[in-house]
Image: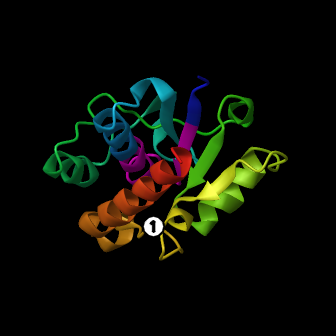
Amino acid sequence: MKQIRIMFVCHGNICRSPTAEFVLRDMVRRAGLDDRFTIASSATSAEEIRGGIGKTVYPPAAAELRRHGIDCTGKRAVQLRADDYDQYDLFIGMDSANLRNMYRILAGDPEGKIRRLMDYTDRGGDVADPWYSERFDVAYRDIEDGCAGLLRTLTK
């Protein structure tokens, strides 16, 4: 069976998108579906990447993941590139600004691969941005709900 390749995307790839990457990886592992998915995350900006080396997951985001038994050790920010479009089946943004930047970086979306994570929930809208609110628990809740809905959709 062909793997489903998912790229989560946010502004800096140090908070929301890596959280989504590791939450979905955990859900997939617990469901025994590891072999059916490739899951990654990236940034629309290069702000968190210096000299070609990305920063690690923002400590409060990593701490929130640990509170839920999820380890993100080793993850470093990377920037979304145009050639990623052919490598992934879905690009899941955290908010409307991410989607606008994804369309720009990926030079459009001819195959309809770009989505917003909260569209997989009953609430819709954007994933709460903890960078400004410092509410990593709220962002985690949004991401967990979105990932659960995404996984349900993909495994129907």
Percent coordinates x, y for residue 49 in the rendering? 48, 38
Q: Residue furthest right?
A: 110
The image quarter in which residue 134 lies: bottom left
The answer to whether 109 appears left or right of 118 in the picture is: right
The magenta stretch spans which residues?
Answer: 6-21
Which is nearer the eye, 8 or 112?
Answer: 112
The answer to whether 10 appears left or right of 74 in the picture is: right
Which is nearer the eye, 90 or 10?
Answer: 90
Q: Residues within 10 Å of mark 1 (few under 14, many from 20)?
A: many
Check if residue 34 falls in the magenta segment. no
- Above or below, 41 against 149 in this view is above
Visible in this render: residue 144?
A: yes
Check if residue 15 falls in the magenta segment. yes
Question: Which quadrant: the N terminus?
Answer: top right
- Above or below, 88 against 67 in this view is above
Q: Residue at x 37, y 64 (%)?
A: 131
Q: Residue at x 47, y 77 (%)?
A: 123
Q: Residue at x 45, y 38 (%)?
A: 77
Residue at the disc numbered 1: 127
